[in-house]
Each structure stands twice: as C-alpha cells, then as structure tokens.
Amino acid sequence: MVQRYFVKEDQWDNQTVVIHGEDVHHIGRVMRMEPGDTIICIRSDQVIAECRITDISSDEVTCHIESWISEDRELPVFVSIVQSLGKGDKLEQVIQKGTELGAYRFIPFKADRSISKWDDKKAEKKIQRLQKIAKEASEQSQRTHIPVIENASTIKEVMAMGETFDAKVFAYENEAKTAEFHSLASHLETINAGDHVLVVIGPEGGFSEREVNTLYDHGFQSFRLGRRILRMETAPLYYLSSVSYQFEELR
C-alpha cells in the first residue's frame, strides 16, 4: 500500500510538493524511503496527487507530482460528534475509530456527569495530540479529510452550534427502556446525502435531567441505539457505522 500524507497548501507549487515536520522523519527514518519511491499527497482542499520523491534531507522531502487522483472515500453525510468527556483514553479511542468510520468533526463535551475534567490551561496541547490522532487515522483509513477537533464545549455552547445543522440528535438511554421509542432507523430516514448532522453522546453516568430538557428545548431529537445500553465510547461508533451502511452500502 502506498503511504499517504496530508500536506498543507503552502507546500504545493506547480508540479512540486515539499513536505516538512514529523512526516519527514516518518518517510526517511520509519519507512526508510529513498528518491524514486512513490507516495500519495493530499491537500487540505482534498486535491490528491501521486508523487515521486526526488530528494530527502533531515528537514524536508521534495516530491514531483506524477499524476492527479480522483477518489470518493468520504462519508456522504457530514457527521459532527459531540463526545462527552470520559475517563482514561476514551476520547482518544473515539477520535481514532470515529475518524476511521468517517466522522467529519469532533467536539469534546463538558457534560454534567463527566468523570474526566477538561483543563483549559492544557487545552491547546491536548487538542494538538487529538488532532495528530485524527490525522494518523485519516491516513491509515485512506481518507481525504482530517476531522477538526474543537475545544471542549459546555451544553450552552453546543446549543449555539446546533443552529447551523440540518439535523441534531442525541443518543438517549431512556429510549431503549420504553416501547414508545424513536429508532435510529427513523432518524436516518429523515437525513439526506450532503446534510450536516450534529450528534450528542452522553457520559458514563448518562445525561442529567437539565441536559435532556435543554436538548429538547433546542430542537434536538432523541433516539435509541438498539435495545442495549452502550458505553459512551461505543455509541458514536454504532451511529457512524449505521450511517455508512445506510448511505454507502444500501445505495
């Protein structure tokens, strides 16, 4: 498999791509590539090129563009995941696997019952780490888009974001406990390819009553993810897999 690298727009010039940063180490030291080897370069506007390495130094890799590539690897629906903060590395797991499954954006969520707390003083470093995880997952899964990782948001800030989306929903465990439930299938029938969807996932302890009322008051629709209660890190992956099946495998 040809290695893929996301390269910033200012590093492209006519038929040449010059790679800087950590990818230089990966190309030269980890993959042990040499001039003449081929890689795939992806620009932030999803322009893709097959490139031949012409020179490798300690701080940059120079490539010649051999051909342009047309790919359709992105999920047809733009899904933004509002992921409640969880203990340990759960947020990292969600971002890595969610990126592989096609998520468009991630917004960490300071839920009332979140066990883990977001340290605003360390936010920039934290987001950089999460963005790196998303970049590597995008390269591994051969995507053309790297999901953006936003700063952690409160319920009020999430509600303000919701005004710009075509659909906004939240996975609610109480929907799995009643015969009068809103199914994921019924939700998927209401969205179309090209829609932007905002999905809110609760923490380990579930949404607080205040959060549920706030979500409903701002036009969010609740739905269930099957008959079982899922872990917070499993729920967004279930949703993304279902969207992929609905819009990519059934059509």
Image (cartoon, helix red, strand yellow):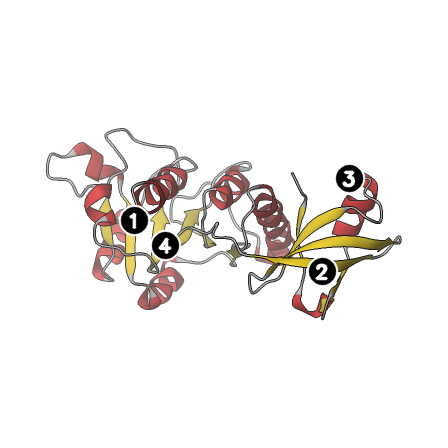
Residue with the mark numbered 2: 65
Mark 4–mark 2 Cα distance, whole angstroms, equals 31 Å
Which residue occupies the foreground of this view, 83 or 77? 77
Identify the element where label 2 is drawn. strand
Label tally: 4
Mark 3–mark 1 Cα distance, whole angstroms, equals 42 Å
Q: Where does the C terminus fall, quadrant-wise?
A: top left
In this rendering, would 172 be left or right of 50?
left
At 77% from the left and 58% from the top, the residue drawn is 63
The disc, 1 or 2, on the residue closer to the chain's N-terminal end is 2
**x and y percentages locating residue 130 in the rendered image:** 59, 49
Mark 4–mark 3 Cα distance, whole angstroms, equals 34 Å
Mark 4 or 2: the one toward you: 2
At 37% from the left and 43% from the top, the residue drawn is 244
Which residue occupies the foreground of this view, 186 or 57? 57
The disc, 4 or 1, on the residue closer to the chain's N-terminal end is 4
Which residue occupies the foreground of this view, 40 or 92? 40
Residue with the mark numbered 4: 77
Residue 19 visible from this viewpoint? no
Looking at the image, residue 238 lies above or below residue 22: above
**x and y percentages locating residue 89 in the rendered image:** 55, 37
Mark 4–mark 1 Cα distance, whole angstroms, equals 16 Å
Mark 1–mark 2 Cα distance, whole angstroms, equals 44 Å
Q: Type of residue at label 3?
A: Met
Mark 3–mark 2 Cα distance, whole angstroms, equals 20 Å
Circle 3 Cα neighbour tier, 10 Å, few/some/many (<14 / 14–19 / ≥20): few
Mark 3 or 1: the one toward you: 3
At 23% from the left and 44% from the top, the residue drawn is 223
At 52% from the left and 38% from the top, the residue drawn is 93
